[in-house]
Amino acid sequence: MKKNTPVSAIMTKNVFSVQLDDQLADVHELVRKHHIRHVPVLHGKQLVGIISKTDLNRLTFSSLFAGEGDTDEAVFEMLTISQVMSHKPRVVKETDSIKQVAEILSTEEFHALPVVDKKDESKLVGIVTTTDVIKYMLEELM
């Protein structure tokens, strides 16, 4: 296994993201439509947070009770992205090794990490997930 392979080799580069002032319902629709679990939150071009499918599921009732979709919409209208997201998320640089990322994911209990520019930690360039790391390791073992 190549110990120094940069995370940029396995990260998702075309990241679905939202703006801080978008509606929470927009995040929910993005997650549902594109089958993604983590959405970086930007203020302009600056990374300010991350929101997960789990964060959204904690707010909803439709998964627990049939016919509660209207209740979900009301909850999404009452709250803002800023109230639900994780602020100042743990990030990795695009030049960090996959090994370093795997260590963070396994010890700090994250499931995804925003990947930022090597010179500007507020500039989002990708996202890496536990699934990306596992797929990489499986390919290396084959």
Image: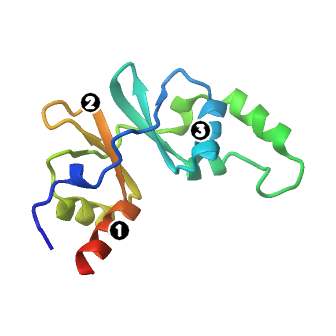
In the rendered image, the vertical position of residue 21 relative to residue 5, given as above or below: above
Label 3 vs 2, first from the N-terminus: 3
Residue visible at 14% across and 59% down in the picture: 5
- State which quarter of the image contains the N terminus: bottom left
Tell me which amino acid carries mark 3. Answer: Leu
Sequence-wise, the earlier of marks 1 and 2 is: 2
Asked whether the residues under the numbered discs 3 and 2 touch, taking CB atoms below 8 Å apart as contact, a structural biologist would say: no
- Callout 1 touching callout 2 (CB < 8 Å): no
- Residue tagged by mark 2? 122
Q: Nearer the viewer, mark 3 or mark 2?
A: 3
Kindly report which numbered mark, 1 or 2, lies closer to the viewer in this rendering.
Answer: 1
Position of residue 71 measured from the top left corner of the image (x, y, whole percent): 82, 39
Q: Secondary structure at mark 1?
A: helix
Q: CA distance from mark 1 to mark 2?
A: 27 Å
Residue on which disc 3 sits: 30
Look at the numbered disc 2 and give the secondary structure of its residue: loop
Tag count:
3
Q: Is residue 43 above or below residue 6?
A: above
The mark lying in front, picked from 3 and 1, is 1
Q: Which mark is residue 135?
A: 1
Residue 82, how many percent across, how many down?
Answer: 51, 30
Residue at x 25%, y 80% (from the top left corner): 141
Q: Out of 10 and 55, give the one closest to the viewer.
A: 10
At x 46%, y 37%, the residue is 16
Residue at 57% from the left image edge and 45% from the top image edge: 34
